[in-house]
Image (tube, rainbow, N blue to C red):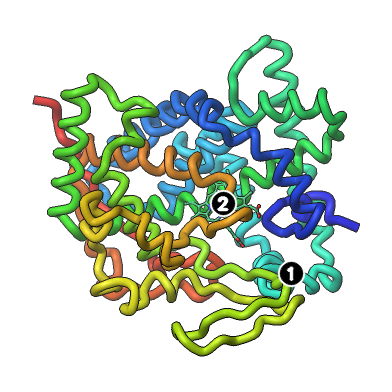
Amino acid sequence: KVDPIFGRNPFLLKGQEWKDKRAEITPAFTQLRIKAMYPVIEDVCERMKKYIIKENKQAIECREMSAKFTTDVVSSCIFGVDAGSFAGGNAPIREMGKRILNFSPRLMLYFLLVQLVPAFKKFFKISLVEKVVETFFVGIMKDAIDLRKRNKIDRTDYLHYLLELQERKKLTELDMVAHAITFFLDGFETSSIVLSFTLYELAKNKDVQDKLRSEIRETIKKHGEITFDVVHEMPYLEQVVAESLRLHPPAFFMSKTCTESCELPIRGTKLETIEEGYYVVIPIYSIHRDSRYYEDPDTFNPERFAPEKGGTKIYKEKGCYIPFSDGPRICLGMRFAQTQLKLAIVSLVKSFEITVDEKTPKEIILNPKDIIPTILGGVWLQFNEIKAK
Ligand code: HEM
């Protein structure tokens, strides 16, 4: 029996169940659909900029600011509603996002153990957590659908896709909510962590920030504005995001089940047999920081991915650049994540000089309580507005 909400996430499924679920949601992430969501992301970038200006000169904790950003993006794209995370007060969807992640060590443990040993699913009951999440999101979903139908809104976003799917496949309300929660859960936290680490690295490395700002200005001069197609054709921005994902991959490991006995070379020579049914843990974080593959691996250096050096392609081919995994289970939201990240970075670097505030710890220690790596004590940055001349 599958868990009604979390158990339908392709991330946690296997075999035919996984294939069916993945096939069902893949069309939601086509280039065309992400392009259609671009103006929605642009709107949220504007709200984030206004929030920074309003906070005025105070240092801003960017882990929380980034989570507000991705919560608003994801909510606008799934439910077509403004989650209002930047409006002050306790915005309910942001609060629910916090609750889901902090819910209890039980939920964290669930995800961790199911990732490591999928068989653990049998022994865990998370029905209470699911009930709260389900009740909350069913309410939002109902309102979102009602609003869309009543106002005859025609927007090619994720909700639009879910409504089409509902017609075609006769999805139940719970199916729809489970899909929406997959997008919400897999989407907002991973991307927000990457955004906060990227802002931190840009603040620490002024030369990189300046070079990126020059690329942004040149691009605007050439194209007038930064559209969806243009944002994906900015080589230095691509390098900065790629390097941030290398140094700070939010999914720091993944586990795979061996479906067919095979032999793997260990340390390049000795062959080791991996039996069918074995669980294999792939430590993304350690691979990305291994000096056998990366020169000076702990240094943030976007130059290593310069186009003339082959970009990330050569590292991907060697299997040592895998922030979004690889193969048939590669992250479904990769293109969407990259789009929202790039747009947020462009929007902030264009408008602000970003520096590290003294409240940020000098030595980075990762919070041992978080399932996704975050900086203990937070990422405190200063934003000084660049006034147009
Ligand atoms: C920078 C942000 C992101 C990173 C680094 C990331 C990373 C990953 C990784 C490493 C996996 C594979 C896990 C495994 O093989 O065990 C994965 C799977 C997945 N991701 Fe992402 N992700 C990000 C953002 C997103 C977003 C925004 C969405 C959706 C909106 C999303 C949806 C998914 C889904 C549905 C899967 C499961 C795919 C499957 O098993 O077939 N991710 N992600």
What residue is drawn where x is 46% and y is 50%? 192
Q: Say if 70 sits above or below 252 in the image.
A: above
Give the spatial CA distance, label 2 vs label 1. Answer: 20 Å
What residue is drawn where x is 50% and y is 56%? 324
Q: Amino acid at mark 1?
A: Thr
Residue 257 image-quadrant placement: bottom right
Where is residue 347 drawn, in percent x and y? Answer: 30, 35
Q: Is mark 2 within 8 Å of ligand 1?
A: yes
Where is residue 368 drawn, in percent x and y? Answer: 50, 76
The answer to whether the residue labelled 2 contacts the one labelled 1, judged by CB atoms less than 8 Å apart, is no
Residue 117 image-quadrant placement: bottom right
Where is residue 317 drawn, in percent x and y? Answer: 42, 61
Q: Label 2, on which residue?
A: 331
**Quarter placement of the N terminus:** bottom right
The image's mark for residue 16 is: none
The residue nearer to you, when weighing 55 against 389, is 389
**Of all residues shown, which one is farthest toward the left?**
389
What residue is drawn where x is 18% and y is 38%? 215
The image's mark for residue 259 is: 1
Where is residue 253 drawn, in percent x and y? Answer: 54, 70
* Total numbered badges shown on the rendered structure: 2
Give whichever of discs 2 and 1 has the lower sequence position. Answer: 1
Q: Amino acid at mark 2?
A: Cys
**Of all residues shown, which one is farthest toward the bottom?**
270
Secondary structure at numbered mark 2: loop
Is residue 272 rendered to the left or right of residue 141?
A: left
The residue nearer to you, when weighing 310 against 153, is 310
Q: Say if 339 sits above or below 272 in the image.
A: above
The residue nearer to you, when weighing 140 against 57, is 140
What residue is drawn where x is 57% and y is 31%? 77
Is residue 273 rendered to the left or right of residue 249?
A: right
